[in-house]
Amino acid sequence: MVNYNGELHLEDTKFLNHRNRGLRYGDALFESIRVIQNKIIFWEDHYLRLMASMRILRMEIPMDFTMEHLEAEILKTMEAGNLDNARVRLSVFRKDGGLYRPDTREVSYIIETELLESTFFVLDESDYEIELFKDFYVNADLLSTLKTNNRMINIVGSIFAEENGYQNCLLLNGSKKVVEALNGNLFMVQGNNITTPPINDGCLNGIVRKKLIEIIQKHEEFTLREVSISPFDLQKADELFITNAIIGIRPISKYRKKEFDFAVAKKLIGRLNTIARLELPN
């Protein structure tokens, strides 16, 4: 089922047209959300990020766009699809009209749901080789930190990875610093130090990135650093892993000739699942 502005439709229903601003100009935002046992995981963080992003893009936030209202609409859509655990995409886009300058700042939304087999985050330890994607670069600015529909570099990078037998690629900014993976934030482990690129390098302001930073800062064994990562640093690392709201943590097994361990990722995914469980009702 698909929820369009509160109305439920079958997935093959045609309810958008060629004037949609998300299609025409990428004038849209989205949140990828994990729902477990009909509870939206890290929902407050997703909601606050969405509201902040809408303000930055000068979208008009409807009066009924409360956390409670959108939560109810997500759960209504899941119930209609008979789902308890799901990957949810909440898309918000400006209403039709105008060229680059919109006729209105009012928004519409779509909620899509897809079955998730695993209840909590599961660490996938299968082979996962990466490479740098250097055809295009991420801008180190505020727009790059938002989860907008402008994902062309991620699309072309994904095609490059497929053509060359890689499972993922890392993106660089104009200063040739490593920013993130195609589908999530990057963390690098060197001894007891865990490093992730700072937001001002242009990386996505990820929800699980935020949660892991909080976890690591409370972990007596590790020191968290938000500093720039160069491509040369990658081969000195003990571990590399990717994070996003759906997979949680995805270890990288190989970058060029360097192979990596998963020990720290195993420790952290346990703690990530612990705080995810705290979101569930007793």
Image: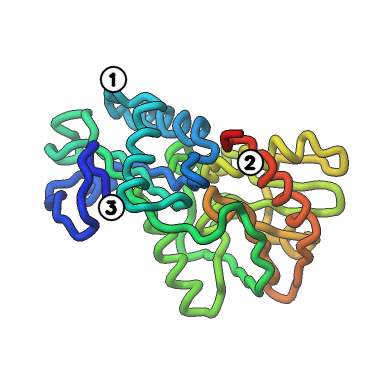
Up/down of 154 relative to 91, above or below = below
Residue 63 is marked as 1
Q: Residue at the far top: name it.
A: 63
Categorize mark 1 by other alpha carbons within 10 Å: few (<14), some (14-19), many (20+).
Answer: few
Q: Is residue 187 above or below residue 170?
A: above
SS under mark 2: helix
Q: What element does badge 3 sit on?
A: loop
Q: Between label 1 and label 2, give the one nearer the viewer.
A: 2
Residue for point 45% across, 52% down:
86
Residues packed near mark 2 inside 10 Å, few (<14), some (14 to 19) or many (20 plus): some
Q: Residue 260, image x and y in percent?
A: 76, 67
Q: Is residue 195 left or right of residue 109?
A: right
Lateral position of residue 178 relative to residue 161, left or right: right
Mark 3 vs 2: CB contact within 8 A:
no
Front: mark 1 or 3? 3
Q: Are marks 1 and 3 in contact (CB under 8 Å)?
A: no
Question: Residue 115's mark?
Answer: none
Please state the total of marks drawn on the protein image: 3
260 left or right, relative to 95: right
Hey, what amino acid is under mark 2?
Arg
State the separation of the CA atoms marked 3 and 2: 27 Å
Q: Give the distance between the C-alpha atoms of the residues marked 1 and 3, in whole angstroms.
A: 25 Å
Q: Do the numbered discs 1 and 2 sit on residues whose CB atoms are within 8 Å?
A: no
Which part of the image, by quadrant, shows the C terminus?
A: top right
Residue tagged by mark 3?
Answer: 1
Closest to the observer, 103 or 282: 282
Q: Which residue is mark 2?
A: 277
Q: Which residue does the image show at 35% across and 48% down from the upper left?
A: 149
